[in-house]
Image (tube, rainbow, N blue to C red):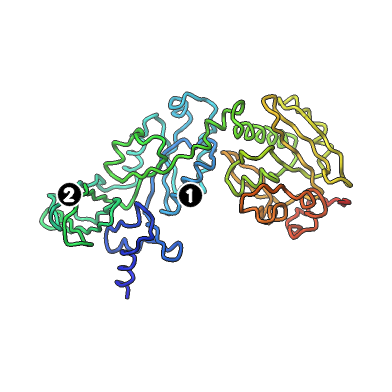
Amino acid sequence: MVFKYLKNILNSNQTNFFFSNIFYSFRNLFKYKHKHKHKYIYMFDYIFTIGCFDKLHKGHIKLLEYMQKHTEKIIVGLHDNNSIEKLKNISDIDPYDNRKKNLEKYAHDVFKIDNVDPTMAIQKYILNNFTQDLLAIKIGSSKDNSKVIKSDYTGNLFFIHHYNDTFKNTCQNNNLIVTRTDKNCGWGQKLIGYKKNWCFMRADDNINFPAIDYVKTIMPIKYLPYSKEISATKLRDFKNNKLGLMNYLLHQVVDILNEHNIPYYLDCGTLLGCVRENGLMEKDTDVDVTIHLSNWDKLKFIDFNKYGLQRTRIANGFPNKKAGNMISVKTKFSNIYCDIYTNPAFPLLDNKILNGKSYNIPLNSELYLTQLYGNWQRPSRRHANTIFHRGNGLVKSEYSKYWDKDFEIFKCNM
């Protein structure tokens, strides 16, 4: 029964490219993880990657989440600020400790890279954490079903490649014998046997990255699609890039609110982008944060000009008008606004990393967004429902059990 089950997996064409058709030894068949019906994903023991991970954005998160599907242990080599300055000729870099903390959700371990060339840092980590000789063994092609290589290696090998071919290895009298197991014939590929069940992954924006010469001697390399829509460089360019400007404006406003001890949370389209997209949405027209109505007077008396922002409009609609009380601010670089709303109730808070910074969001943001948008998981042109945003609609909605009882719930007429 077990062998029939394994044979079905071997013959399946519905598994993931690169990993799906790779079998290294009998015990590794059980590394496959059942994710969906009739779909299996190969699980590595370790996946290595390196990078700056500055202003951790949705491009980074997409790569890391892909890796999480293929291993329980992601090991990240993280450049320190000094090496990034030399590498990219920039100084506006999030502190190393912040960037490391942002990776904790994804990484099993993080080690520091203190040089433009990460080779020595990778070698040091490998040496300190993996004791055996790890150089991969070049098997090459074969006209016959088996090939004998002179080697005193006696452990299991992992044959990672793009083809359907499967192999096993045995050792005898200082000879390594590699045998093809799916067919009784030779193979044309330049086969390599790896001594660990691991892989190196990174974005394909730099396929000849520093340290490639060392990495490829011990593990296979998999390149993942680079996200062109967002980057730390674009986020820095707040004078010319819309997402960069929105990120800068949000960062500034939140810092101001924190300085004045005004609790806040991301709201409306900004919250939607943060939760659904792991980033700000370029199609959005503004940035949205919300405070409690009790802090309205505090907000009104903030001199935003002092922080390089301009107050553009103010609404005093509470308790009778849908707009409620609100202040909008903008930078001198664009007419994109940050709307600072006031709500008659205030939620319990959670937090989420957005472009490298931790922001407050409502606890159970999924339910909160459902009150505002209905089916928020599917992108649409629908705007937040005002009735369920700044009035009794939200206050008395299903979300009401998540209001923070330390904040008064004001009565309103909307």
In the rendered structure, find residue 17 and report the number of the disc placed on it.
none
Q: Amino acid at mark 1?
A: Glu
Q: Quadrant of the image for the N terminus?
A: bottom left
Instruction: Tell which of 351 and 144 is nearer to you.
Output: 144
Quadrant hosting residue 240 = top right
Residue 213, image x, y percentages: 29, 36
Numbered disc 2: secondary structure: strand
* 37 displayed left or right of 214: right
Number of labelled discs?
A: 2
Q: Nearer the viewer, residue 299 or 202?
A: 202
Q: Position of residue 72 (x, y in %)?
A: 43, 54
Q: Answer left or right for 337 relative to 236.
A: right
- Residue occupying the far front of the picture: 381
Identify which residue, 174 or 291, lies in the foreground.
291
Q: Work out how far the residue at label 1 is from the one at label 2, CA to CA, in angstroms.
A: 35 Å
Left or right: 28, with 183 as reference point: right
Q: Badge 1: how crowded within 10 Å, few (<14), some, or many (20+)? A: few
Residue shown at the point (74%, 43%) measured from the top left: 290
Would you call the spot at circle 2 few (<14 residues within 10 Å), some (14-19), or many (20 or more)?
A: some
Tell me which numbered mark, 1 or 2, is placed earlier along the sequence.
Answer: 1
Tag shown at residue 141: 2
Residue drawn at point x = 10 percent, y = 56 percent: 173
Q: Amino acid at mark 2?
A: Ser
Check disc 1 and report its element: helix, strand or loop.
Answer: helix
Looking at the image, the residue that sits furthest to the bottom is: 1
Of labels 1 and 2, the one closer to you? 2
Residue farthest to the left, as pictured:
173
In the figure, is residue 140 to the left or right of 265?
A: left
Give residue 401's position: percent from left, percent from top. 74, 59
Tell me the residue that label 1 is attached to.
Answer: 65
Residue 47 in the image: state x and y as whole percent.
38, 48
